[in-house]
Image (cartoon, rainbow, N blue to C red):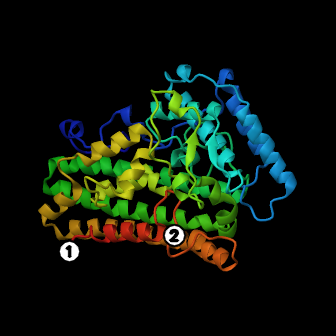
Amino acid sequence: MQGISSTVTGVAKASSAIQNTPVYNVDPQSGFMPPEEPLARLPIIWEPWESMLDAAVAAKLQLGGKPGLSEREQAISKSWRASVRRMPLLSTTELQSSHILLRRAHHVLTYVMHFYIHSLPPHDPVVIPRALALPILHVSAHLDIPPILTYSDTALYNWIHKHPLPTKVPEIDNLRTRTMFTGLVDEEEFYLCSARIELRGVDALELMRVTMDEIFIGDQTAVRRITDYLHRMATIINELKTLLMDVRKGCNPETYYNEVRPWFNGEDSDANRRKWIFEGLDDDPSLKVPTELSGPSAGQSSMIHVLDVFLGVDHHSSADRPSFMSRMQTYMPRNHRLFLDHLSSNKRPLRAFVMASADVLLCEVYNLAVVALKEFRDAHMIIATLYILGPARRAARQGEVLERRESNPLLGTGGTELVKFLKDTRTRTSETIIP
């Protein structure tokens, strides 16, 4: 990472745990988001995929389980799905030399797949047509991410500038969403809330870099500087919390729960526990049966993971059972995972340095940053209650949804037990505070 000037020596910079290299695709101005608008359209050879996505959006396809779905809406969805089944099987070979093309292909194909699956009648089997299934599997294999819609598809690589600017870099107040299932402002605001958090977190990444530089030096001057950096880090995390809570300004909870959220569901959060069958998979020995089919989740945000790694929050993975947060890393862009691995391998972690320093003020400010992260997770609990738990209870009382039963706990779009996951991550964060 590059950015604000550091006062440490060149030797210290060279040893920084966050190196100045583009290999991780972490940009000094946009962080984990690309530094310019993501590719808008694939070359003409893959136009059938783009056209199919355009047709789904233009037809305003409805959820197959929507209460009161009209015969006309059912017919429109059925006709569109038939056109997907008639698509030609296109090669992905020429995509493989370009990460940008692969990312766009994953975005388009997974949106088409989710349109296809979630417009089906809720008890119909899920059989993804060969002309869609095989390209998704090949593209995902080359990107080393699961063949399903991810957080990066909906937030990191799904934006355009609201107004033209001299700079190409995304700005918090100048973003629009490119692809949506519903076209509703509620869906757009949900995506943009995540994008704004990513962009505000860029300054946190820079503070991590200069902090690691100072840890390498480790003298009293470094301690004073790290104390200042951590104070600023706490402020930024508090601002992330504010941005998270601001989703309420443009996203209605009932609309989100009933009309937007169901489009995100993966196989492991299917209300009827249907298995997703990728047609043609068995005929291609180079492909593997997908083992990860969870929908997009905030748990896939590299920004939140990097805050955990930096502050030393341990989510308690075991050799035989990775934690949910660890599992969610498999859904991140590969280079972002490498960045997290690199940061995790730092031989002088911040928390250990703070404890070893025995500096009272440094410890207090470190704890201030951890508390800010814990309060961010408190806010996440509030949003989850407002947007998921509350609407789920109301729907269950009305007899419209069977999702909330004691034998079948409410699942997040990432496939985990939502309440337990949120409480556990909050607890792990609180346990990081130094006594």
Residue 374 location (% of width, % of height): 38, 69
Extreme residue toward the right, this view: 72
Q: Secondary structure at mark 2?
A: loop
Q: Which residue is mark 2?
A: 408
- Mark 2, residues whose alpha carbon is within 10 Å: few (<14), some, or many (≥20)? few
Residue 295 location (% of width, % of height): 53, 52
Residue occupying the point 55% across, 40% down: 169
Q: Earlier in the sequence, mark 1 or mark 2?
A: 2
Q: Is residue 154 above or below residue 258?
A: above
Q: Nearer the viewer, residue 86 or 153?
A: 86
Tag of residue 64 = none
Q: Is residue 406 above or below residue 113?
A: below
Amino acid identity at mark 2: Asn
Residue 300 location (% of width, % of height): 45, 51
Q: In which quadrant will I find the C terminus? A: bottom left
Q: Nearer the viewer, residue 358 or 333?
A: 333
Q: Is residue 107 above or below residue 250?
A: above
Q: In which quadrant will I find the N terminus? A: top left
- Mark 1, residues whose alpha carbon is within 10 Å: few (<14), some, or many (≥20)? few
Q: Is residue 17 left or right of residue 174?
A: left
Q: Is residue 205 left or right of residue 383?
A: left
Residue 211 location (% of width, % of height): 27, 51
> Can residue 175 be spotted in the picture?
no
Residue occupying the point 49% across, 21% down: 97
Q: Is residue 305 left or right of residue 408?
A: left
Q: Secondary structure at mark 1?
A: loop
Q: Nearer the viewer, mark 1 or mark 2?
A: 2
Residue occupying the point 69% across, 32% down: 50
Q: Which residue is mark 1?
A: 435
